[in-house]
Amino acid sequence: MLESTSTVRIVMTTVADAEEAARLGRTLVEERLAACATILPRVQSIYRWQGKIESSDETLLLLKTAIEQLPALESRLKELHSYETPEFLVLGVEAGSQSYLSWLSGSLDVSQGTKV
């Protein structure tokens, strides 16, 4: 059964390679800032950087979290990330299975009182 949620978020960031994605994902899950990190290797990004069009092979990292975790997650990601300006895009989640949402809530920093 699907349950509506207004607090679950998916954060997207790209990183240089799969090793960095694994390191960041593991750290953020261990620190309970994200419940899950999904790594999508070998994406190609085309973007403007310092006045030039660039193209890079990167790895996409999807972090499942709650809205209350976003400030701490963004701060920590900036500390750990190898990029000068890391991508930090937050996507809302309309609904999810009740069992998954309960697991997600239980996997985050309970000292913050996070409840999904």
Image: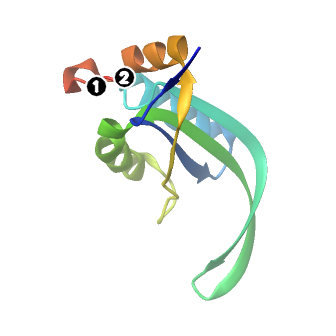
- Amino acid carrying label 1: it is Thr
- Amino acid carrying label 2: it is Leu
Q: Which of the pair 87/54 is nearer the observer?
A: 87
The C terminus, quarter of image: top left
Query: In which quarter of the view is residue 28 placed?
Result: top left
Task: Tell me, yes or no, if residue 20 can be seen here.
Answer: no
Q: Which of the pair 84/44 is nearer the observer?
A: 44
Query: In which quarter of the view is residue 102 placed?
Result: top left
Per the rendering, the mark at residue 108 is 2
Assess whether mark 1 and mark 2 are in contact (beta carbons under 8 angstroms): yes
Q: Which of the pair 110/98 is nearer the observer?
A: 98
- What is the x, y in percent for residue 1? 59, 14
Which one is earlier in the sequence, the residue at label 2 or at label 1? 2
Q: Is residue 43 left or right of residue 103?
A: right
Extreme-bottom residue of the structure? 51
- What is the x, y in percent for residue 6? 41, 37
- What is the x, y in percent for residue 84? 47, 65
Q: Which residue shows up at 53% across the image and 16% down it?
A: 100
- What is the x, y in percent for residue 79? 36, 50
Q: How is the image coloured?
A: rainbow
Q: Secondary structure at mark 2?
A: loop
Q: Which residue shows up at 41% across the image and 17% down it?
A: 107
Residue at the disc numbered 1: 114
> Callout 1: few (<14), some (14-19), or many (20+) C-alpha neighbours within 10 Å?
some
Q: CA distance from mark 2 to mark 1?
A: 7 Å
